[in-house]
Image (cartoon, rainbow, N blue to C red):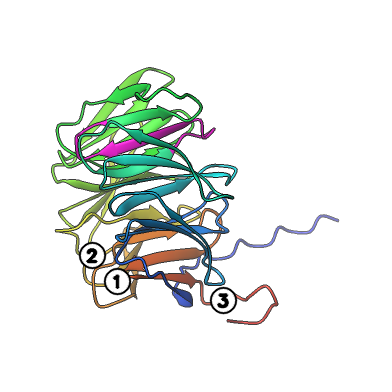
Amino acid sequence: MAFPEPKPKKPELPQKLLATLECKQGAIRAVRFNADGNYCLTCGSDKSLKLWNPHKGTLLKTYCGHGYEVLDAAGSFDNSQLCSCGADKTVVLWDVATGQVIRKFRGHAGKVNCVQFNEEATVILSGSIDSSVRCWDCRSRRPDPIQILNEAKDGISSLKVSDYEILTGSVDGRVRRYDLRAGELCADYIGSPITCVCFSKDGQCTLVASLDSTLRLLDKDTGELLGDYTGHKNVTYKMDCCLSERDTHIGSCSEDGKVYFWDLVEGSLVLALPVCNTAVQSLSFHPVETCLLTAAGGLVQCWREESYTSEEGVPT
C-alpha cells in the first residue's frame, strides 16, 4: 500500500533571536554565511575579518591584512579559502585554517565594494567604485587581472556569480548580466542607483535593490518586471537584499532598523522584523535553512523561525 506524501510545511520566516555576536570590529560592513551555512564572516571597519559559528555565538578566527575597513567577503565552495575586499583598493585571498594571506591582488583605482569566488574557487571577481569588475586567477602568480569588465558608467555596488553568469549592479542604475557560455552582455535599466543584486535559487530571476526604496524582481532572460516590493526605507546607504531558502519570500535591510519580508508571488508585506534603532546595514540568509543573519552597528544577530528547536531537541 502506498502512503500519501506528507504535506509540505508552510514556509516560516526567521523572527526569533537565537544569538547575538558582539563582534568588536567597529561598525560591521557586511555579514555573510559560508557555502554550507555552518559559519559566517563579518567584515569590520577596524580592518579585520572574523569567522564565527553564529548558531552558538562563538568566534573561531580573526584575519588581519587590510589597510582600511573591510567591505565584503566570501568563502570558497569547500570552505578552505576566503576572499575579502576593502577600502584599501585591495582583494585578499586567505587560507581559512592558518589565517594566513595567500595572495593580495591590487589594480583597482578605488575602494572595492564586493567580492565573489567563481564556482570552482579558481577565480576571484571584484567590483569597485572605479566602475570595473576585475577577475583574478587564484592559481597564477601574475599580478594583473585575467579579465576586466568595464561596461559600467559608475561604481559597481554589488556582484553575484553563478556557474556561467556574472551579475552586477551599478550606481549608474543598470543591472548587467554577463553570460560566459554565450559571450553575451544583457543590461536592464532601473533608473535609480543600485545597492544590491542577487539570483533566485532556481536561477530564473534576479532581485534588484535600489535607492528609491524599491525592490524589483526581474525575469533573468527577458528583463521583464515580475514584481516590485516597497515599504522599507533605502535612500542613503548601500544595503543588502535576499531571497529565502525556498524562494518563497524576499527580504531587505532598511534604514529604519527593521528587516522587511514580502511574499514573492503576492507581493504583500508579511513581516517587519525589528532589529535595532539604527539602519540595518547587512543581512545574509542561510542557503538551506530558515536562518537569517543581520548586522547593525557593531552587532550581528542570528534569527530562526518560531518553531526552531536546538540540536538537543529543546526549544530555544
Of marks 3 and 1, which one's residue comes earlier in the chain?
A: 1
Which residue corresponds to mark 1? 258
Q: Position of residue 168 (x, y in %)?
A: 30, 37
Which residue appears at 37% of the width and 32% of the height?
Answer: 166
Q: Nearer the viewer, mark 3 or mark 1?
A: 1
Residues in magenta, as a range: 117-132
Q: Which type of secondary structure does the marked residue at label 1 adopt? A: strand
Report crowding for label 2: few under 14, some 14 to 19, many 20 or more residues within 10 A (C-alpha). many
Q: Quadrant of residue 106?
A: top left
Alpha-carbon distance for marks 2 and 3? 26 Å
Q: Nearer the viewer, mark 1 or mark 2?
A: 1
Viewer can see residue 204: no
Report crowding for label 1: few under 14, some 14 to 19, many 20 or more residues within 10 A (C-alpha). many
Which residue corresponds to mark 2? 232
Alpha-carbon distance for marks 1 and 2? 8 Å
Of marks 2 and 3, which one's residue comes earlier in the chain?
A: 2
Alpha-carbon distance for marks 3 and 1? 21 Å
Which residue corresponds to mark 3? 307
* The one of 210 and 296 positioned closer to us in this rendering: 296
Amino acid marked by disc 3? Ser
Q: Position of residue 2 (x, y in %)?
A: 81, 55
Above or below, comparing residue 113 to residue 149 in the picture: below
Quarter in which the N terminus is drawn: bottom right
Q: Tell whether label 1 touches label 3 (CB within 8 Å).
A: no
Amino acid marked by disc 2? His
Amino acid marked by disc 1? Lys
Residue at far top of view: 183
Q: Which type of secondary structure does the marked residue at label 2 adopt? A: loop
Which residue appears at 17% of the width and 42% of the height?
Answer: 171
